Image: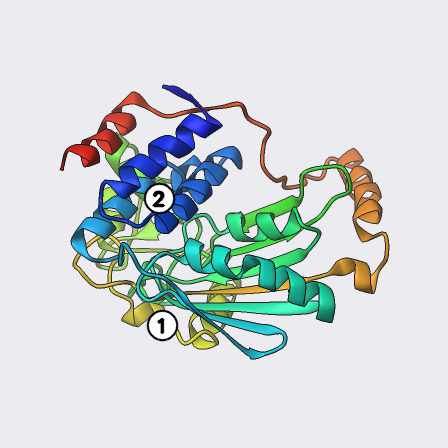
Amino acid sequence: MSYNLDSARELAIRVILATGASQAVATSLAEATVGAECSGRSGVGFAHLPDYLEGFLNGRITATAEPEISFPTPTIIKADAKGGIAQLGFDRAFEELLTRASTYGVSIFSLKNSYTAGELGYYVRKLAHRGMVAFATTNGPALMAAGQGAEAVYGTNPLAFAAPVDNRSPLVFDQASSATAFVNIRKAAERGEDIPEGWAIDEKGNNTTDPREAIKGALLTFGGTRGANIALMVEILAAGATGANWSLDAPSFDEGSESPGAGVFIIALDPELLSPGFSARLVSQIERLSAKGIHIPGGSTILEEIDIPSSLVETLESYCLK
C-alpha cells in the first residue's frame, strides 16, 4: 500500500498513540520511522514499529516518559530517557546540540536508559542537514559473539557518520559491527530463507545458515577481530561513557517488561570552523571518487510516497483495536 509522507506519519502517530504513548513520543517516533523509510532502511522503519508498539504495551518502553536533560559542561549534553525512546531525548536536545557545536566547534550528546535507538542514521543525518559533521554509536541487548567465544556479549553495536555536502543530500552511512543487522536474520526466518555463512552461529557455537538457529545462537562480527574491536569501541562510548547498560546487562528488546536501558553517544562538529568551505570542498572530492567507481553512501531519498506491505498495515492497524 502506498502512503504519501504526511499520511505515513499520520498512520504511525495514530497506532503509537493507541498503545498509550504521549503525543510527544508518538511524534518523535513517527518522524524517525518515516525518516528510515526515506533513507532506504525499511527494516528499521515501519517493519520495526511493531517492536515499539509491543514495547509500549508490555512495559519495555515507558510510553509517556519525558527525558531529563542536563548540561554538565558547555559542550556536553546529558539525557536520561527514563525508560522511554531515544528519539525523543535527541529531539529535545537537538537545538541545544546545534547551538553549542556552532559556538564551541564541537558538542557531545550522551543518552542512557532508552529502548533501542532504531535507525542510527536518523540522528546524524538530521545534524548534517544543519551543517554538522556527526558521529553516533549505540548499543543494545547482547546478540553478537566476539573472538573465539560462542556467547553473545555485544549488541549489534552500530555506528553512523554523516557530513554535509553543498547543495546535495548529506553523505551518510550507518552500519552494524555485526556481519549483518539482526532485522535481516529475523526477516530471513520469517520468510524461511537461508542466510549466508559467516553471519551467525547456533547455540552450540557452530556456523549456521539457518536463521532460526541463528536467533537461538549469536550474530558474528564483520571482519573477525577488527569488527570485534569496533564493537568494543562502540560499547565503551554508548554504554560506558553514557552510564547505560552494558549489552551483557541489557534486558531483551522483544521479551519481558524491562527496558533494555541502552545508550546513545553522539558527537556534533562544525566543520566550517576548522575548514571554511568544507561542504563545497567535499562535493569535489565526492565527484572525484565517484568517477573512479567508488560507492559514496547517501542520505535521504526524495520520496513522495512510501510503500508498506498490506500485511504490515493490517498488523499496525490491529493495535488500534486492542
Q: Position of residue 108 (x, y in %)?
A: 58, 69
In terms of secondary structure, where does tag 2 sit?
Answer: helix
Look at 41% across and 50% down and name the residue there. 118
Q: Position of residue 266 (x, y in %)?
A: 55, 63
Sequence-first disc among 2 and 1: 2
Instruction: Read off the residue under disc 2.
Output: 183
Look at 41% across and 29% down and name the residue there. 8
Asked whether residue 105 appears in the rendered view, the answer is no
Nearer to me, 197 or 219: 219
The residue at the far left in this view is 322
The residue at the far front in this view is 23
Q: Position of residue 215 (x, y in %)?
A: 25, 50
Quadrant placement of the N terminus = top left
Look at 72% across and 37% down and name the residue there. 168
Report the disc number at residue 246. 1
- How far apart marks 2 and 1 lie (CA) works out to 21 Å
Look at 25% across and 55% down and name the residue there. 217
- Badge 2 density bin: few <14, some 14–19, many ≥20, Cα 10 Å: few
Judged left or right of residue 233, residue 170 is right
The residue at the far bottom in this view is 72
The type of residue carrying mark 1 is Trp
- The reply to whether discs 2 and 1 touch (Cβ–Cβ < 8 Å) is no
- Badge 1 density bin: few <14, some 14–19, many ≥20, Cα 10 Å: many
The type of residue carrying mark 2 is Val
Nearer to me, 282 or 86: 86
